Image: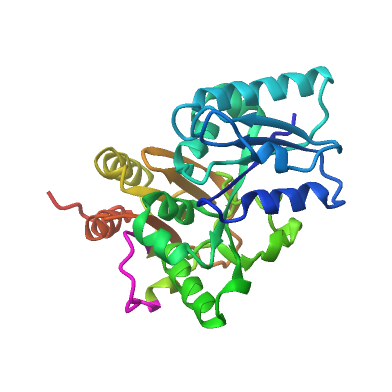
Amino acid sequence: MSLIPVTILTGFLGSGKTTLLNRILKEQHGHRIAVIENEFGEAGIDNDLLVQGGDEQIVEMNNGCICCTVRGDLVRILGELQAKKSSGLLNFDRVIIETTGLADPAPVAQTFFVDEDIVQHYVLDAIVTMVDAKHAPQQLDEHHEAQEQVGFADRILITKTDVVTPSEVAQLRQRLVKMNPRAKIAQALHGVADINDLLDIRGFNLTAILEIEPDFLTDVDHEHDDDVSSFVFRETRPLDMDRIEDFMGSIVQVYGTQLMRYKGVLNILGINKRVVLQGVHMLMGSDYGSAWKPGETRESKLVFIGRDMPKEILLKGLAQCVAGEVQSV
C-alpha cells in the first residue's frame, strides 16, 4: 500500500500560508487533498477563509499550537483520516498541514518518524515555509520560531515582495540561503506558486537521494549573525559504518537540541549503495539509496543545520570515521 504524502505548510504569523493554501485548493491540479489547519486559540478563523466545496476534507485544530499542546490531536486526526480513507468514507490522496505561525516545525516533523501507526500510512513529503519579505528581517532577529521554520524548510516561498524594494528581497534571499542552503527559494505573490514544485518532491524522505551543495560557505561576511547556521562535511575516502553510527549516536545525545537538521549521502566501506543519513534533533535514521555507478566518484556529503553547533567537534569526529584511520584516544 502506498504511503499518503504529507506537506507541512509553515511560516511566521502573517506570512501568507492560508493565501497559498487557498490557491492550492482552487487550482485544477487533480489532487484530492485533506487539510489539517491549526490555529492558536480557542476560536479559529482560518477555516472560514479556506475555500470549500471540492473534494477537500478540512479539519480544524484550534485548541493549541500543533507543535506542543495538541500534538496528540494531530496523531489522532491523522489516524482518523486514514481509517475513513480505508473504509471509503473519505477520498483523498494527500494531506496538507497548515501550522500556526508560532509553531516550531521540528515536533510536527518528528511525528512522522516516531509514531508507528503514522509511519505505516504516511510519509513526510516536504516542509514548505512562507517568509514575509516585509517583516522577516525583524522576525528572524527576534523569534527563534521563525528561524526554526527557515532551518527546517525544503522549500521557501518569499511573499509580499510587492511591498519592498528588489534590493531588500535580494538581501533577504541571501540571508535565507546562508541559513538553509538546501531549500529551493521562490517567490509567491498573492499565493501564486508552482504547485508541481510544492507537492510530491520527497524533500524529507529518508530514502531520497540527497545531493548536498556546499557553496553556502562563500558568504561568510553577511551583516547578520543568525543563530541558525550550516556547514558541510565532505570526504572521498570510504567511511566505517560502525564508527559513524557510534559517533553520531553520541553526538545527538549531547548536542541534539542544537542540531535542527542533518542529512546527507555516505560512502560506506563494503557497501555498494549510497547510505542516506538524516536526522531531526535527537531523532536519526538511515537507509540505502541508489547503487554507486561503475566509475562514479564516491563521496560522502553530510550537511548540518542548527544553532550554536560544535562544528569543529563534528568535523574532527567525522574525519576519524574514515575506514582505516587510527582513532585518537
Q: Can residue 272 be seen in this view?
A: no
Any magenta on residue 227? yes
Any magenta on residue 145? no
Q: In the figure, is residue 97 to the left or right of 274?
A: right
Residue depicted at 47% across the width and 46% down the height: 278
Q: Quadrant of residue 225?
A: bottom left
- Of 143 and 305, nearer the camera is 143
Q: Is residue 40 above or below residue 181?
A: above
Q: In this view, does 259 lie above or below 82?
A: below
Q: Quadrant of residue 116?
A: top right
Residue 318 locus on image (x, y percent):
30, 55
Q: Quadrant of residue 252?
A: top left
Q: Is residue 203 visible?
A: yes
Residue depicted at 44% across the width and 53% down the height: 146
- Magenta stretch, main secondary structure, is loop
Residue 157 locus on image (x, y percent):
60, 62
Residue range corresponding to the magenta coloring: 218-232
